[in-house]
Image (cartoon, helix red, strand yellow):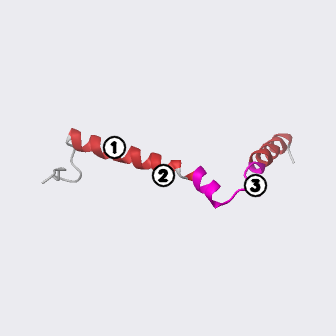
Amino acid sequence: MPSFLQAEKSKNRLILSDCDKPDAKLGTYYSLVLPYPLIFLVVWLLMLLAWYLVGLPIGPGIYPRLS
């Protein structure tokens, strides 16, 4: 195996070794993953609000409005 691939392989082993935590429970994984969907939710809501405030059409000739 070429030396540059060997070095890359050893780095991956170091990174992946941190993922294996035998004492981790399901709540640990939930707490690690939960911030990502919350961030996506906030960003999409801000984009939707900005789209509404600017008044851009959401389709051909269809503008967002509250009735």
Residue drawn at x 79%, y 45% is 14
Is 35 a magenta residue? no
| Residue 37 coordinates in the image, percent (x, y) | 48, 52
Residue drawn at x 40%, y 45% is 42
| Residue 30 coordinates in the image, percent (x, y) | 58, 56
Please tell me which residue lies in front, 24 or 37.
24
Q: Which residues are magenta?
A: 16-32
Q: Quadrant of the rendered structure where residue 46 is?
A: top left
Q: Earlier in the sequence, mark 1 or mark 2?
A: 2
8 to the left or right of 44: right
Q: Quadrant of the rendered structure where residue 53 is?
A: top left
What type is the residue that disc 2 sits on? Pro
Instruction: Provide the residue designation for mark 1.
Output: 47
Q: CA distance from mark 3 to mark 2?
A: 23 Å
What type is the residue that disc 1 sits on? Met
Please tell me which residue lies in front, 55 or 28.
28
Residue lying at the far left in this picture: please name it.
67
Q: Please tell me whether mark 1 or mark 3 is closer to you in this view.
A: 3
Q: Earlier in the sequence, mark 1 or mark 3?
A: 3
Residue drawn at x 44%, y 48% is 40
Instruction: Provide the residue designation for mark 3.
Output: 20
CB-based contact (under 8 Å), mark 1 and mark 3: no
Q: Please tell me whether mark 1 or mark 2 is closer to you in this view.
A: 2
| Residue 48 coordinates in the image, percent (x, y) | 30, 46
Q: Earlier in the sequence, mark 3 or mark 2?
A: 3
| Residue 44 coordinates in the image, percent (x, y) | 37, 47
**Mark 3 surroundings: few (<14), some (14-19) or many (≥20) residues within 10 A:** few
Instruction: Provide the residue designation for mark 2.
Output: 37
15 to the left or right of 44: right
Q: CA distance from mark 1 to mark 3?
A: 37 Å
Is 19 a magenta residue? yes
